[in-house]
Image (tube, grey):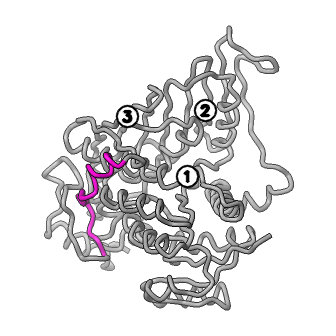
């Protein structure tokens, strides 16, 4: 089996979490790149004989590198993915694929010109219950999907200052500025993976409940969630959240179809509940079927220690298999930019109290032309120093101001909140 020689951009967080999964899937980490020398030093201590780079221009020229994993800041992946594709280096990109609509157009055009493979590193579809729901749905006994729900619910302890500081070290950090609609792939991608239905229209509304606590440190936006509704290319409908913070921590998915429904339980057990209409029960099933799918015995140990419910193992496996077999990934550049478009345009819908937006199909040049100069963004950009060009929230009283940002920076970095 051919070893895939891969480099990693960004090794402080998600980048380093993939080290073991790369190695067990017959990959070789040959180079790492980061803007912080201490991160490179830590990676070198872990990996041993690996080239380290502070400058991406030098990193991308590393001799014999087959592929790169792009795991820098959330909204800044596209420029580096494009550079790699232009050099015919395979790209596995963390989510989201593009921070602006214009970047999505540029990314698709680069991927179409390249001889290299592009894949989105979205891991939640590969959790065992989502793989089981795909198997059952694609088996046909449920019929066509009509409605589906996906929730990624990840509330934070507002008084857990140490963890908040790690996630949001300053007020210009993307997580502090993050609108709720943007971190969407963990809720949306599993539904697309299970059903194959592609969003074509989106509208979104906010769930507003600012986090107030004694230490005075709060999320930069007042929303707890974005409730996002998508009309799909087969007339089915999705209801998804971005990264929500209501209720309790859980990931849940439900597929409602012509003859029944299938969902994972919200108890953390990975159990699946498959229900059929009493007049549509297939042979070998009951009306109600509650069970826990299991990984194959021969790969269970590798999968279970990989992180994110086994998802990280399958992300690397699929990417490497696609390179070795010279085939296009399911989570290709069109899949990736569709999910990003739902996030970006879903946020705009929320800013306009639910006004719907059509989701472009970047296979079509007319759709690309509409957005090729659309650089609107709610984020500070560390690559070019640009500032947000649209609000993070539709509630002016919670807009970022220099005073609010300075207050957050002071409190998050002083001993009064230890």
Q: Is residue 164 magenta?
A: no
Residue 166 against residue 104 in the figure, above or below: below
Q: Secondary structure at mark 3?
A: strand
Vertical position of residue 245 compared to residue 45: above or below? above
Span highlighted in magenta in the image: 365-382
| Residue that extends furthest to the top in the rendered view of this protein | 279
Q: Earlier in the sequence, mark 2 or mark 1?
A: 2
Which quadrant does the C terminus fall into? bottom left
- Measure the alpha-carbon separation of dots 3 and 2: 18 Å
Q: Are marks 3 and 2 in contact (CB under 8 Å)?
A: no
Question: Which quadrant would residue 6 be assigned to in this image?
Answer: bottom right
340 w.r.t. 253: above or below: below
* Residue 203 sits in quarter: top left
Query: Residues under labels 2 and 1: Cα distance?
Result: 22 Å
Give the SS element for disc 1. Answer: loop
- The residue carrying pointer 3 sits among few (fewer than 14), some (14 to 19) or many (20 or more) residues within 10 Å by Cα, namely many
State the mark number for residue 197: none
Residue at 71% x, 16% y is 287
Q: Is residue 245 visible?
A: no
Using the image as rendered, state which of residue 169 and residue 381 is in the foreground. Answer: 381
Q: Secondary structure at mark 2?
A: strand
Residue at which label 3 appears: 229
Q: Which residue is mark 1?
A: 331
Residue displayed at 62% across by 29% down: 262
Identify residue for label 2: 263
């Amino acid at each position: 089996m051919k070893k895939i020689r891969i480099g990693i951009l960004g090794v402080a967080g998600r980048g380093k979490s993939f080290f073991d999964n790369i190695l067990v899937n017959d990959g070789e980490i040959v180079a790492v790149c980061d803007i912080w020398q201490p991160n490179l030093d830590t990676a070198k201590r872990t990996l041993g004989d690996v080239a380290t780079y502070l400058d991406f221009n030098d990193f991308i020229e590393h001799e014999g590198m087959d592929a790169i994993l792009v795991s820098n800041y959330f909204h800044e992946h596209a420029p580096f993915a494009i550079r790699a594709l232009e050099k015919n280096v395979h790209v596995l990109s963390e989510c989201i694929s593009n921070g602006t609509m214009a970047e999505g157009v540029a990314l698709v055009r680069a991927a179409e010109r390249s001889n290299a493979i592009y894949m989105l590193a979205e891991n939640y579809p590969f959790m065992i219950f989502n793989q089981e729901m795909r198997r059952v749905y694609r088996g046909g006994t449920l019929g066509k999907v009509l409605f589906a729900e996906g929730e990624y619910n990840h509330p934070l302890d507002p008084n857990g200052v140490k963890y908040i500081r790690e996630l949001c070290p300053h007020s210009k950090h993307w997580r502090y500025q993050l609108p709720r609609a943007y971190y969407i792939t963990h809720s949306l991608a599993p539904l697309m993976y299970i059903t194959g239905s592609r969003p074509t229209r989106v509208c979104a509304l906010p769930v507003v409940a600012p986090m107030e606590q004694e230490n005075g440190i709060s999320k930069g936006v007042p929303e707890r969630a974005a409730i996002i509704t998508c009309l799909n290319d087969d007339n089915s409908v999705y209801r998804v959240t971005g990264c929500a913070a209501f209720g309790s921590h859980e990931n849940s998915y439900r597929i409602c179809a012509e003859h029944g429904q299938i969902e994972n339980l919200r108890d953390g057990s990975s159990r699946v509940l498959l229900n059929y209409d009493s007049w549509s029960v297939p042979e070998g099933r009951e009306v109600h079927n509650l069970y826990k799918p299991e990984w194959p015995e021969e790969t269970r140990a590798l999968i279970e220690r990989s992180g994110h419910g086994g998802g990280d193992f399958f992300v690397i496996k699929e990417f490497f298999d696609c390179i070795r077999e010279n085939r296009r990934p399911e989570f290709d550049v069109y899949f990736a930019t569709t999910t990003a478009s739902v996030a970006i345009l879903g946020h705009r819908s929320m800013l306009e109290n639910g006004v719907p937006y059509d989701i472009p199909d970047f296979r079509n040049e007319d759709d690309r032309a509409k957005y090729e100069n659309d650089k609107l963004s709610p984020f500070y950009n560390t690559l070019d120093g640009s500032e947000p060009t649209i609000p993070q929230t539709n509630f002016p009283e919670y807009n970022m101001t220099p005073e609010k940002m300075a207050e957050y920076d002071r409190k998050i970095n002083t001993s009064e909140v230890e």
